[in-house]
Image: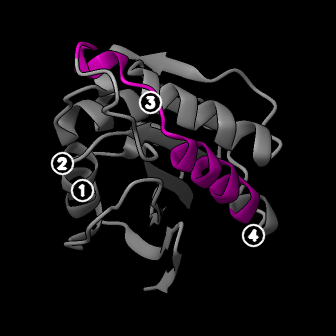
């Protein structure tokens, strides 16, 4: 059994309208939420062994703040492929992970992550900013992950509360 944590980036700033979407940073509220979510994951004993993030500034900032708060010790892997990705792209990248990584987190964007969550679990759930969906995958190796894999949505965490599934 593998665990996948799917995190939508935290609240971003629209202050500078001249910035490209890819370059938008987090708001102060987003920074706070990313840290809070990292602390909640650490307290649950779910600190991932691997974090993969979109290269968008707001996603990488979310991943970095989260990682520090949950005491993540490895390097964050940033990939442009998580920006505007279809579920199949996430699956392709996850299939290449080291099997020693039992718990993996991806940080990205909507609607991409909601589509991935639905694809992996069948659950139609909204992922507000900084929300984390914990998915239990019935696989022993990441290479086993494919279009037919059906995981289970264990919980959905949001900055303003916890929704048990």
- Does label 4 or label 1 sit earlier along the sequence? 4
Question: Which image quarter is the N terminus in?
Answer: bottom right
Query: Mark on residue 114?
Result: 1
Measuring 49% from the left and 39% from the top, which residue is drawn there? 27
The residue pinned by badge 3 equals 58
Magenta segment: does it hold 24?
yes
Q: Secondary structure at mark 1?
A: helix
- Magenta-highlighted residues: 18-40
Residue 19, relative to residue 106: is it above or below?
above
Measuring 42% from the left and 34% from the top, which residue is drawn there? 94
The residue pinned by badge 4 equals 44
Residue 12 falls left or right of residue 117: right
- Does label 3 or label 1 sit earlier along the sequence? 3
Q: Nearer the viewer, mark 3 or mark 4?
A: 3
The secondary structure making up most of the magenta span is: helix
Separation of marks 3 and 4 at Cα, in angstroms:
25 Å
Residue 72 falls left or right of residue 124: right
Residue 75, relative to residue 4: is it above or below?
above
Separation of marks 2 and 3 at Cα, in angstroms:
15 Å
Question: Are the residues flagged by discs 4 and 2 in contact, CB closer than 8 Å?
Answer: no
Closer to us: 45 or 100: 45
User: Residue 41: percent from the left, percent from the top?
Assistant: 69, 61
User: Residue 146: percent from the left, percent from the top?
Assistant: 26, 45
Residue 151, relative to residue 107: is it above or below?
below
User: Residue 139: percent from the left, percent from the top?
Assistant: 46, 56
Separation of marks 2 and 1 at Cα, in angstroms:
5 Å
Q: Nearer the viewer, mark 3 or mark 1?
A: 3
């Amino acid at each position: 059994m593998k665990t996948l944590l799917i995190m939508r980036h935290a609240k971003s700033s629209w202050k500078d309208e001249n910035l490209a979407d890819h370059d938008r940073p987090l708001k102060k509220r987003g920074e706070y939420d990313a840290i809070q979510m990292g602390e909640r994951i650490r307290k649950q004993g779910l600190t991932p062994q691997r974090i993969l993030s979109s290269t968008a500034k707001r996603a990488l900032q979310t991943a970095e703040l989260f990682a520090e708060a949950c005491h993540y010790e490895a390097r964050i892997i940033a990939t442009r492929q998580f920006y505007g990705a279809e579920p199949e792209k996430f699956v392709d990248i996850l299939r290449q992970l080291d099997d020693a990584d039992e718990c993996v987190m991806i940080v990205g964007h909507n609607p991409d992550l909601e589509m991935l969550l639905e694809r992996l679990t069948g659950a139609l759930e909204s992922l507000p900013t900084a929300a984390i969906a914990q998915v239990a995958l019935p696989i022993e190796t990441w290479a086993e992950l494919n279009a037919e894999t059906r995981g289970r949505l264990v919980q959905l965490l949001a900055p303003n509360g916890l929704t048990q599934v």
